[in-house]
């Protein structure tokens, strides 16, 4: 059994796609994958309700931990929890806080993130959510996409695992680009997480 911890700060649509991907029939595969824990810094995050209702399938009833900034940055509690639960892979799905160095060191090449642009462009501090798509449209880009990458101590700088792109029409608004990018996220993130965890 391989165990995933999902970190999310917002709606959690990617977390749900990933949980649903590993629910049901896939649990019967030889290499089982379980979503052991959902962690969030945001007590109002949509991901909490999604997890409590068992995500899309109703099959994955996952404990949720809400933590605050001092706990994350000034104690070892989260690292110890993840280690005690035997977590193999940490998946960031719209998680907005920088991962502290001790967590990166405890899970080397075992933390993945998805960024809604083609890194190394449009990444780094402050480049998240709608800011990314507004910058892409303002620059007149003809394509954008997703980057799935390992996480290190710096925002959006770890080794790239997978990228997929979409074209941008001249008339596309940032909201249009966001929709195209989200389709790519939902299509590819679960499968790529599966490939990463099977390779561990
Ligand atoms: C996604 O666009 C992801 O790339 C970014 O945050 C967004 C999360 O959306 N890092 P959701 O919470 O999974 O719906």
Image (cartoon, rainbow, N blue to C red):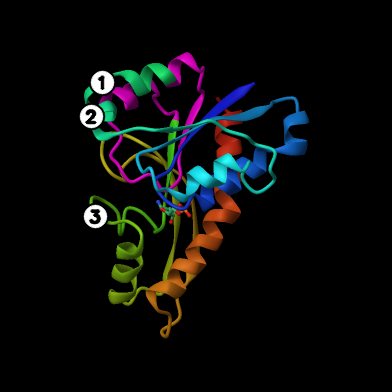
Quadrant of the frame with the N terminus: top right
Residue drawn at (31%, 70%), measured in percent from left and top? 134
- Using the numbered discs, state the Cα–Cα distance from disc 1 to disc 3 in whole angstroms: 25 Å
Task: Please provide percent x and percent y for residue 151.
Answer: 36, 36
Pointer 2 residue? 70
Which one is in front, 137 or 95? 95
Left or right: residue 133 versus residue 53 is left
Residue 135 numbered mark, or none: none
Q: What stretch is highlighted in magenta?
A: 82-110
Disc 2 secondary structure class: helix
Residues under numbered marks 2 and 1 in contact, where contact means CB atoms less than 8 Å apart? yes
- Using the numbered discs, state the Cα–Cα distance from disc 2 to disc 3 in whole angstroms: 21 Å
Quadrant of the frame with the C terminus: top right
Task: Please provide percent x and percent y for residue 86.
Answer: 51, 17
Q: Which of marks 2 and 3 is nearer the N terminus?
A: 2
Pointer 1 residue? 75
Pointer 3 residue? 126
Residue drawn at (39%, 58%), measured in percent from left and top? 118
The reply to whether the magenta stretch includes residue 98 is yes
Of circles 1 and 3, the one toward us is: 1
């Amino acid at each position: 059994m391989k165990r995933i911890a999902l970190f999310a700060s917002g709606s959690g649509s990617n977390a749900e796609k990933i949980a649903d991907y590993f629910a049901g029939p896939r649990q019967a595969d030889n290499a089982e994958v379980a979503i052991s824990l959902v962690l969030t810094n945001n007590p109002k995050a949509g991901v909490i309700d999604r997890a409590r209702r068992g995500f899309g399938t109703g099959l994955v009833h996952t404990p949720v931990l809400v933590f605050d900034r001092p706990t994350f940055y000034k104690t070892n509690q989260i690292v110890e929890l993840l280690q005690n639960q035997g977590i193999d892979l940490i998946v960031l799905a719209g998680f907005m806080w920088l991962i502290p160095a001790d967590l990166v060191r405890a899970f080397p090449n075992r933390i993945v993130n998805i960024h809604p642009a083609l890194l190394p462009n449009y990444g780094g501090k402050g480049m998240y959510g709608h800011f990314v798509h507004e910058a892409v449209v303002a620059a007149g880009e003809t394509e954008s996409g997703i980057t799935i990458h390992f996480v290190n101590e710096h925002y959006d700088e770890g080794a790239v695992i997978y990228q997929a792109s979409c074209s941008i029409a001249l008339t596309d608004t940032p909201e249009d680009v966001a929709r195209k990018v989200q389709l790519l996220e939902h299509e590819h993130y679960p499968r790529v997480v599966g490939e990463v965890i099977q390779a561990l």
